Image (cartoon, helix red, strand yellow):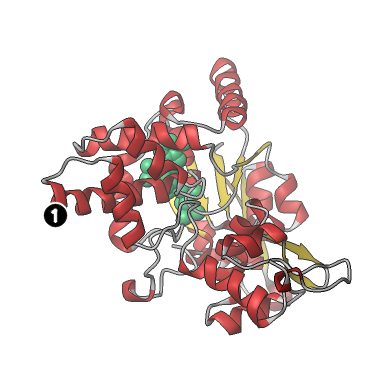
Amino acid sequence: MTPREDETEAARTSPVDPWPTPDERAADATLRPGTLSEFEGQPRVVDQLGLVLEAARHRGHTPDHVLLSGPPGLGKTTLAMIIATEMGAPLRITSGPAIQHAGDLAAILSGLTEGEVLFLDEIHRMSRPAEEMLYLAMEDFRVDVVVGKGPGATAIPIEIPPFTLVGATTRAGLLPGPLRDRFGFTAQLDFYEAADLERIVVRSAARLGIEVDDASAAEIARRSRGTPRIANRLLRRVRDYAQVHNGGAVTLELSRGALELYEVDPLGLDRLDRAVLEAICRKFGGGPVGVSTLAISVGEETETIEEVAEPFLVRLGFIMRTPRGRIATPAGWRHIGLVPPDRSGGAQPDLFA
Ligand SMILES: Nc1ncnc2c1ncn2[C@@H]1O[C@H](COP(=O)(O)OP(=O)(O)OP(=O)(O)O)[C@@H](O)[C@H]1O
Ligand SMILES: [Mg+2]
């Protein structure tokens, strides 16, 4: 479950939204790489995680608890599944929002079998009492079940078999320190290089039985905002377009036509990204402007601006986050066809442009 799951499909129109649509969950499953060697990109994470798993196999122990953090659609769930597969261990999946009471967690933990991998998605959204129970379970493989109320309450310790917790979060900053410290290995997933995404597009195309030439794969990869989930989605949209316009064969010209139709620009900006940039430049004179003001002015949730539009715009060097708010850079002004103001205090250069 993601923070946006409760939204209707119609409310989400951007093809470069990194959160999955409900019907994409099934599609995701068919495109997921099954082993660490099939996992493209993220070389440092893959190497380090490979070592952690190898060492655990060697010692005959369960691997350390693993924390996976990073923006949506970069492969956290995929890696959790790979960890279980590589260890030959069963996988149990739950999520922070599903654990409202400590009792929910106690039930899950006491039902684990030895070596099982427990995947706790969106771990930052777990309730506080459950979190405290998790500390003990992670450290001592024990839960204290409290029986009774008030002064007569007693804690009954229950042993649980050694297991590996794999936590995933898009908001590592929201995790309390004591929880973060209990993970033996933390992997910070980063946006993918275009070359890695290109390989992912080619691989997914093969799995879906779509013929895609190299130039089209590169074009799709370039517009995918460093995110495999978006690359896979754009590939499916391009395929749909190609089926209608060209009997199915994907060419560069066709890919460009499709992506233009879906309003994904050559750098992967969608309508919201451009709206944010335009608002900063046109309504707020280039900033600084606070994120909540910005969100209202483009009619979006603050969370969406912060988690989706902003990281990407910052990464492209189009906006900057400052303590006083968001500022558009000269490159940002130019991307939407405007002339950046002369910040040196002189005359507006667009008077002379
Ligand atoms: N390294 C990779 N190589 C190939 N495909 C990948 C890779 N990483 C992710 N994918 C593809 O991207 C899709 C989304 O990945 P995944 O569901 O693991 O993301 P996530 O980080 O868990 O996202 P969320 O934060 O929304 O839960 C999957 O269908 C998978 O096929
Ligand atoms: Mg996930």
Judged from the image, the quadrant occupied by ligand 1 is: top left
The residue positioned 39% from the left and 63% from the top of the image is 263
Residue 206 location (% of width, % of height)? 25, 32
Instruction: Say above or below: 314 vs 59.
Output: below
Instruction: Say above or below: 54 vs 93.
Output: above
**Is the shortest distance between ligand 1 and the CB of mark 1 under 8 Å?**
no
- Residues 282 and 13: in front is 282
Residue 236 location (% of width, % of height)? 27, 49
Instruction: Say above or below: 11 vs 202.
Output: below
Residue at the farthest right position:
345
Q: In the picture, residue 39 is in which quadrant?
A: top left
- Residues 119 and 79: in front is 79
Residue receiving disc 1: 244
Q: Is residue 293 visible?
A: yes
- Residues 347 and 274: in front is 347
Amino acid carrying mark 1 in the image: Val
Residue at the farthest left position:
247
Which quadrant of the figure contains the N terminus?
A: bottom left
Residue 342 location (% of width, % of height)? 80, 67
Residue 179 located left or right of residue 228: right
The residue positioned 45% from the left and 49% from the top of the image is 223
Residue 66 located left or right of residue 22: right
User: Dot 1: few (<14), some (14–19), or many (≥20) neighbours within 10 Å?
Assistant: few
Q: Is residue 110 visible?
A: no
Residue 286 location (% of width, % of height)? 72, 73
Which quadrant of the figure contains the C terminus?
A: bottom right
Residue 332 located left or right of residue 212: right
Label 1 element class: helix
